[in-house]
Image (cartoon, rainbow, N blue to C red):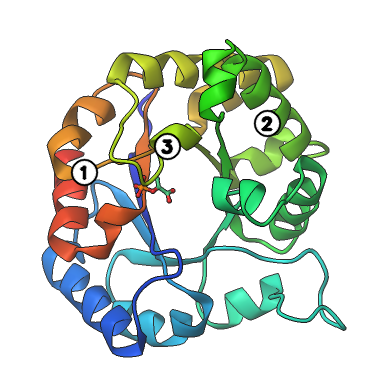
Amino acid sequence: MSRKLFIAGNWKMNTSQAGSVDLAKALVEAIGSVDKVDMAVCPPAVYLSSVADALSGSNIALGGQNVFYQDNGAFTGELSTAMLKDVGCKYVIIGHSERRHVIGESDELINRKVVKSLADGMSVILCVGELLEQRQADQTSEVVTRQIKIGLESVHAADMASITIAYEPVWAIGTGVTASPAQAQEVHAMIRNLLAEMYDESVADATIIQYGGSVKPSNAAELLGQSDIDGALVGGAALKAEDFAGIVQAGM
Ligand code: PEP
């Protein structure tokens, strides 16, 4: 089965009002009409509207970095799916390792967000990945399996077309250390087998599994060349139009 590559940029808590618009405009200029690869950027929530304007008419979609599982009410600081969609988001990142390990989100909370986002018609990038000490203790498969099983609890096969899994070993995020293509491929293949067990072969074959962790133009082609790596979730290199465009071009 041939899966279309999907490259997404996670801008995290970076940029500014003017900087986010400049970055979005530079991306539109460089890769806005690419159609061989699916693309999205996820700016800070306060800049979503202005970035949406800058991306308008291009092939680069917009995503949020987080969402809450309620529609509205007394949830200070949170954002609903309706709010994200209102400003043009198609995607939402859920369960990023910084939200798991810095903010303290549990697999159960992440699952509630996944289920709510799917119910409200959003496409989800569900992030999973092991800590360095878990890899060193040979627990990668166990940790990733638990994150996926709980994260996707009560998600039906019919909704899996709206799920992208991002495998991001925590020790490779923002560290400059990349998992080797073979290390990443091994976990991606394990994830695809797990999806076949949880759903069926056709869901497993069709699901996009991105790799994330210090992806840059110089290592993208080799990572994206692995049979079970279907794209990238990019942090640091997504903040430079030239680098993000280089990663997209490596996938073409
Ligand atoms: C990320 O934030 O998802 C990420 C992979 O970051 P970086 O590319 O900087 O490692």
Label 1 beta carbon less than 8 Å to ligand 1: yes
* Amino acid under disc 3: Gln
Report the amino acid beneath label 1: Lys
Q: Residue 9 appears at what percent x and percent y?
A: 36, 57
Where is residue 22 shown, x and y percent of the image?
22, 82
Choose between 35 and 18: the one closer to the eye: 18
Relative to 218, is 66 above or below?
below
Say if mark 1 contacts mark 2, CB within 8 Å: no
Between discs 3 and 1, the one toward the N terminus: 3
Q: Which residue in the protein does label 1 denote?
A: 216
Mark number displayed over residue 1: none
Mark with earlier residue (1, 2): 2
Residue at x 52%, y 77% (from the top left corner)? 45
Q: Earlier in the sequence, mark 3 or mark 2?
A: 2
Q: How far separated are the C-alphas under marks 3 and 2?
A: 14 Å
Q: Which element type, helix, strand or loop, lies under badge 2?
A: helix
Residue 251, x across and y down, in percent: 21, 39
Answer whether residue 152 is visible to the viewer in this image: no
Helix, strand or loop at disc 3? Answer: strand
Instruction: Farthest residue to the right: give it.
Output: 74
Residue topped by disc 2: 148
Pointer 3 residue: 210
- Residue 221 higher or lower than 94, as above or below: above
- Of tags 3 and 1, the one toward the viewer is 1
Work out whether 154 lies above or below 18. Answer: above
Q: Which residue is drawn at 79% across and 51% down?
A: 109
